[in-house]
Amino acid sequence: MESAAVILMGGKSSRMGRDKAALPLDGQDFLTRLVARFQEKFDRIYVSGPGRLPDLRPGQGPLAGLETVFVRTGAERIFLTAVDLPFADPVLAQLLLDGLEGKDACLIRRDSGKLEPLFAAYCRSCLPHVQACLDEGCRAMGALLDRLDCRILEERDLPDFDLDRLLLNVNTPADYHRAEKISNSSLQ
């Protein structure tokens, strides 16, 4: 089955103060870096956001991006990641896609109990639920997950992956500085 990765762009980057997709890391901006990484493992890469694959419902957050990808591409299964996860791992992404097996979604639950809906695999079967949430004015990924049949992979069951690094979400200048330090230490 064809695999598609979706990189979500959008948001106002208000905490960062500038476009996160354009932040440089190891000589590439975040978006270029993620596209290159995911092209190694995925048949198709879609970039959801302004100027790329524009949302059917602009300004409605990640749910609108998820809706747009399923409606506009015909993809049956997608892996969703956010542009502000510069260390996102396509091998772990494929593991999540493989975990779908008859479920609407497959995602990671961190040891803290936090779910990772913006680094997760989704089937087209979730589309009516995505649309229902948006129609009701609910933009929260958690509200969507409550409606889906999800497979949850526990952090403790993924010992081969450094999730603190792979799921580092860069939202603020301090987060960006941390990402630069991590990147510099991995180059040595």
Image (tube, rainbow, N blue to C red):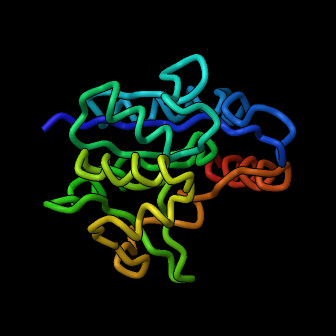
Q: Position of residue 30 (x, y in %)?
A: 63, 34
In the displayed structure, would residue 77 be above or below residue 186? above
Is 7 above or below relative to 117?
above
Q: Which quarter of the figure has residue 105?
A: bottom left
Q: Is residue 83 left or right of residue 144?
A: right
Camera-side residue: 58 or 137? Answer: 137
Give left or right: position of 15 versus 133: right
Q: Quadrant of residue 152?
A: bottom left
How many marks are shown on the rendered structure? Answer: 0
Image: 146 above or below 66: below
- 156 left or right, relative to 22: left
Q: Position of residue 161 (x, y in %)?
A: 43, 65
| Observer-nearest of 94 and 52 | 52
Q: Residue at x 30, y 35 (%)?
A: 4
Q: Nearer the viewer, residue 122 or 99?
A: 122
Looking at the rendered image, the quarter that the N terminus falls into is top left
Percent position (x, y) of residue 106? 31, 62
Residue under the image location 69 percent in, 54 percent down: 182
Which one is in front, 50 or 159? 50
Q: Position of residue 3 (x, y in %)?
A: 24, 37
